[in-house]
Image (cartoon, rainbow, N blue to C red):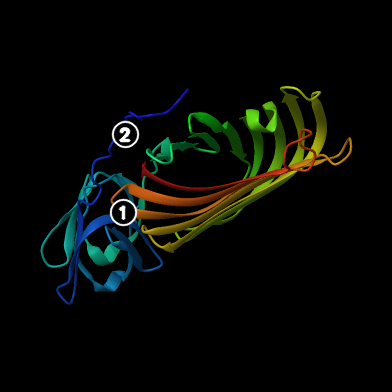
Amino acid sequence: MRIGTLVFAIFVLFNASAFADEVQLRGGDRYTGQVVSLAGGKLTFKTPHGDLSIPWADVVSLTATAAPLRVTVRNQPTATVTAIAADDQGRVTLTPGGAVALADIDSIALVEPPIVVTGGANAGWISTAGNTDISTLRLDGDATIRQGANRYRATAAVNHAEDEGEETVDNWTASFDYDRFLTKRLFVNANAIFTNDRFRDLDLRTALGLSLGYQVFDTPRIKLTASGGLGWVNEDFIITPDDDYFAARESVGLDIAIVPDRVLFFHKHDSYIGLTGEDNLFIKTQNGVRLTIVKNFVTTVQWDLDYDRSPAPGTNDSDRRFTLTFGYRF
């Protein structure tokens, strides 16, 4: 099918702005944003330009209505409040709870919703006409759901290209992960990766894995997970005889906020190292930098590698892909 024009629509659900809280400091500075936490005498306050760490002793007024909060007042049990309203002379009114002195508040924490959903979608398209007639299309998306001790993640990507009306790229891949946290950091992981690429004679490659993982870092600046275990790979080829093998599986995911809320570096790789057969190994990696353009709209520069040490005869063992896409994160 020749791609002459591309018409597509991306529907997204915009969350209401969270920047409805306000904090005032002794020097007269006033910030609008969202209360994140109060711990160890430091108030973490999220603003559109990044997180602030403010000594609690410097706060003279606080108004918080963006989200329910868990508040601990001196000599009282922790309670959930729906609002903190600025009062006079260093006091605030908790709803429910009544008026208290700011200095008597020992801790504040966000009430985590039962389900947290994050993710995004991206698209990139190039079309030329005249002396050259080339069309390329890239669509990808991901979603992560966190519900208590359970974390679910799904990704998908489609690539298509034509040169003078002849297809030169036609592939798709999808992955699914389920993590069950045994402790705050230790989890059990089940993983599935599906890949189709007719130019590699690959009708469907299915990789299934079961691993034990660890959340090494989970901070606003860096997130690092690593897991390892066993897996099974089945390759259904279009022409070449099918193949399957048992494998050792290892996976690493890394996110680094180079500039918080602005520039993010990410890396993800999955390796299935054959335990049976000869030369059985495949590695799938994703590397890139995501730049926030405005609010939730982003542009992503990404480099992907799919390596198979025993490809179908007549095909290369590596597929490398460089993409530039625009998208939306939620």
Q: Which sits earlier in the primary sequence, circle 1 or circle 2?
A: 2
Characterize the local packing of mark 2: few (<14), some (14-19) or many (20 or more) Cα atoms within 10 angstroms: few
Could you tell me if residue 78 is visible in this image? no
Which quadrant would the C terminus be assigned to in this image?
top left
| Residue reaching furthest to the bottom | 27
The residue at 66%/34% (across/down) is 190
| Residue reaching furthest to the front | 131
Left or right, 34 with respect to 277, comes to left
**Position of 58 relative to 87 (above/below):** below
x then y, percent, for residue 246? 82, 33
x then y, percent, for residue 55? 32, 72
Could you tell me if residue 227 is visible in this image? yes
The residue at 75%/31% (across/down) is 233
Q: What residue type is labelled 2?
A: Val
The disc placed on residue 85 is none
Q: Which amino acid does label 1 sit on?
A: Ile
* In front of the other: 116 or 253: 253
Q: Kindly report which numbered mark, 1 or 2, lies closer to the viewer in this rendering.
A: 1
**Position of 1 relative to 323 (above/below):** above
x then y, percent, for residue 314? 76, 35
Look at mark 2 in the image and give the residue it sits on. 12
Classify mark 2: helix, strand or loop: loop
Look at mark 1 in the image and give the residue it sits on. 293
